[in-house]
Amino acid sequence: MVKKDRTEREKEIYSTYYSSPIGSLMIASDGDNIIGLWMEGQKYFANTLTETITEKDDLEIFDTANKWLDKYFACENPPISDLPLAPRGGEFRKVVWKILREIPYGEVITYGEIAKKVAIQMNKENMSSQAVGGAVGHNPIAIIVPCHRVVGTNGSLTGYAGGIDKKVKLLEHEEVDMSGLFIPAKSTAP
């Protein structure tokens, strides 16, 4: 039997937990990059991970992520670029998640606006807002990749896999003007 070195086999996946004002967060890493951050009970929790996950709190990447989250929850607006991110997904989803990283702290954007940006970046005539909604809903790095900043065209606080209550708390934390936003009667989370 030939032993494979680390470059030939899949990297190990590590996790740690962060206690936040909105509940426990699980952070996942390949040892070098953040590949996931999920809220306890979140829809699609850790669904991009197929490997065995080893809890390991003492990785440098987790220390960096914890410091970033500390700053975020202290209203310091840390740059996303301070973290090495490697979300797992197809090309379309990665384009959407890159656009999410460009949404300024304390601001919101609509699914339709993202769809227009995706169409331009992918050299398409147009793009479905519903397809964008699916990609936003499957964002594997919550909070850091700020999918909570996406709203419906009419101001509906819709489609948040972490739960509308957490979306509202995150937007209020960022001091978003909530006057034109509302919670829909029926959830449309992807």
Image (cartoon, rainbow, N blue to C red):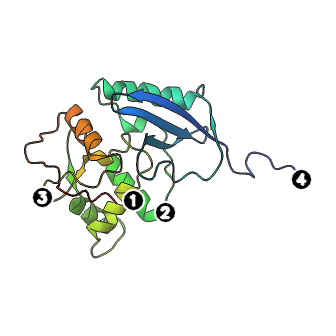
Residue 163 placed where, x, y %?
31, 46
Give the camera-side residue of 46 and 147.
46
Sequence-wise, which precedes: disc 3 or disc 4? 4
Q: CA distance from mark 4 to mark 2?
A: 32 Å
Q: Disc 2 or disc 1, which is closer to the eye? A: 2
Camera sees residue 102 = no
The residue drawn where x is 38% and y is 53% is 97
The alpha-carbon separation of the residues under discs 1 and 4 comes to 38 Å
Classify mark 4: helix, strand or loop.
loop
Position of 161 relative to 40 (above/below): below
Q: How far, Cα to Cα, is label 3 from label 4?
A: 59 Å
Quadrant location of the C terminus in the rendered image: bottom left
Determine crowd level at label 1: few under 14, some 14-19, many 20+ residues with C-alpha closer than 10 A: some
Q: What residue did someone put label 4 on? A: 2
Secondary-structure class at tag 3: loop
Sequence-wise, the earlier of marks 3 and 1 is 1
Quote the CA–CA distance across marks 3 and 1: 24 Å
Q: Is residue 28 visible?
A: yes
Q: Which residue does the numbered mark 3 point to in the structure image?
A: 154
Q: Is residue 10 left or right of residue 104?
A: right
Q: Residue at x 8, y 48 (%)?
A: 180
Q: Identify residue type, mark 3.
A: Asn
Report, in whole angstroms, how far the alpha carbon at label 2 lies from the one at label 3: 29 Å
Q: Quadrant of the N terminus?
A: bottom right
> Which label belongs to residue 90?
2
Which label sits on residue 95? 1
161 on left or right of 178: right
Q: Nearer the viewer, residue 189 or 133?
A: 189
**Dot 2 surroundings within 10 Å: few (below 14), some, or many (20 or more)?**
few
- The amino acid type of the residue labelled 4 equals Val
Above or below, 188 against 20 in this view is below
